[in-house]
Image (spheres, rainbow, N blue to C red):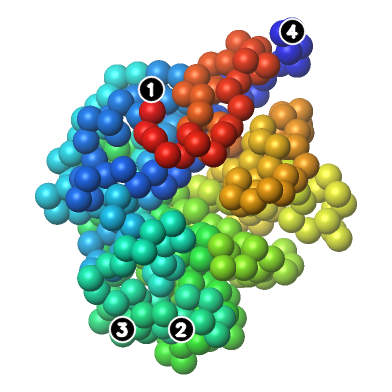
Amino acid sequence: MTMSRSTEVLFQPFRLKSLDLRNRIAMAPMTRGFATDGVVGPQQVAYYRRRAEGGVGLILSEGTVIDRPASRNEPGIPFFHGEALPAWQPVVDSVHAAGTAIAPQIWHVGSVASKTTDWRPDAPMESPSGLTAPGEPCGVAMTEVDIADTVAAFARAAAEAKRLGFDAVEVHGAHGYLVDQFFWSGTNLRDDRYGGPTLPERARFAAEIIAAIRAAVGPDFALLLRVSQWKQQDYTARLAETPEAMTEWLAPLVEAGVDMLHCSQRRFWQPEFPEIDGETGLNFAGWAKKLTGAATMSVGSVGMTGDFVDVFTEHRSETASFEGLLDRMERDEFDMIAIGRGLIVDPDWAEKVRTGRREDLTPFEIGALMSLA
């Protein structure tokens, strides 16, 4: 059966500074962990090329780490610095050849240890206050020198992205990793200028990273920031309980140089502040766009029968409504939608949706995470 509702809204071009996209669909950044000694190779080239050939407008790479001693928590996470950089060039070239834009997601895991391996970095893990979650010590608290070096490392990585021909860069500031650990009052107990009781105070670290990147790449290179309310350490955590608090958190980051906020929810269809606009109200990306004026991207279990946390349990949440996605896009609630697991199992996700073949989409199975195909 052919789906009758038009999906044209997903396939409108989108432009934002250095980004010139054929549609509004992005491949979400997803840790895959198959880089050898931190270096990508032919299998990553083929992996990203296939998703580009399948019709997505933008590929956001898997998280790829900056030049800090303990920036990654698994051995297969790729580097985005030093001798690992040239290996990204074939990835960029192959994606561009298929008509798709690409941006690396640059990352520091902070003090979050891997849940799937016992591997640990050689250096102590670092975070704002030596905590991985409220009341859970791990690693060391960063000094101001560590912070300055980390800011500079993010800026260098972004400059390398531009040099290699990437179309934009995304900073990972979500899900309880380093940047997000500074945002979160439960893990940022600092009493210097990088801590404090308010979100604007705790967002200083992120703002300095964004400002340093903007200085390094110039005014016209698109800069994305991924943010979330929830943390992998606490799925119920919320940084901003009100629109006013969200503005205090996000507006200074946009002012510092963010062009697009990539707003991660476990379930994109859930309203951010239902007490204000009801059960069909704006989601996180919708509120972020309304409050800051920045472009936004939404993400969170599009087309899935359970969110990605459910993948590792027997629980399955309500099915995401594809029609609900179209409704939100048609009313311009947010500018782009990112697809994660759907693109792991089905590189042709975008083309099948464009041609009305949603019934042919490959269902997600957890086994797909065990290989890079």
Crowding near the residue tagged with mark 1, few <14, some 14–19, many ≥20 C-alpha atoms within 10 Å: many
- The alpha-carbon separation of the residues under discs 4 and 3 comes to 60 Å
Q: Which amino acid does label 1 sit on?
A: Arg
Circle 3 — which element? helix
Circle 1 — which element? helix
Q: Is residue 129 above or below residue 35?
A: below
Q: Residue furthest bottom?
A: 191
Q: Which amino acid does label 3 sit on?
A: Glu
Q: Which of 279 and 9 is in front in this view?
A: 279
Crowding near the residue tagged with mark 4, few <14, some 14–19, many ≥20 C-alpha atoms within 10 Å: few
Residue beneath label 4, please?
A: 1
Circle 2 — which element? strand
Residue 316 shown left or right of residue 134 in the figure: right
Query: Which tag is nearer the camera, tag 1 or tag 3?
Result: 1
Q: Which of marks 2 and 3 is nearer the N terminus?
A: 2
Residue beneath label 3, please?
A: 144
Please identify the quadrant where the C terminus is shown: top left
Residue beneath label 2, please?
A: 137
Q: Which of marks 1 and 4 is nearer the N terminus?
A: 4
Quadrant location of residue 59?
top left
Q: Which amino acid does label 2 sit on?
A: Pro
What label does residue 187 carry, if any?
none
- The alpha-carbon separation of the residues under discs 1 and 4 comes to 26 Å
Q: Which amino acid does label 4 sit on?
A: Met
Q: In this view, does 73 lie above or below 297?
A: below
Q: Which of marks 4 and 3 is nearer the N terminus?
A: 4
Query: Which tag is nearer the camera, tag 2 or tag 1?
Result: 2
Image x and y of residue 53, in percent? 40, 18
Residue beneath label 1, please?
A: 50
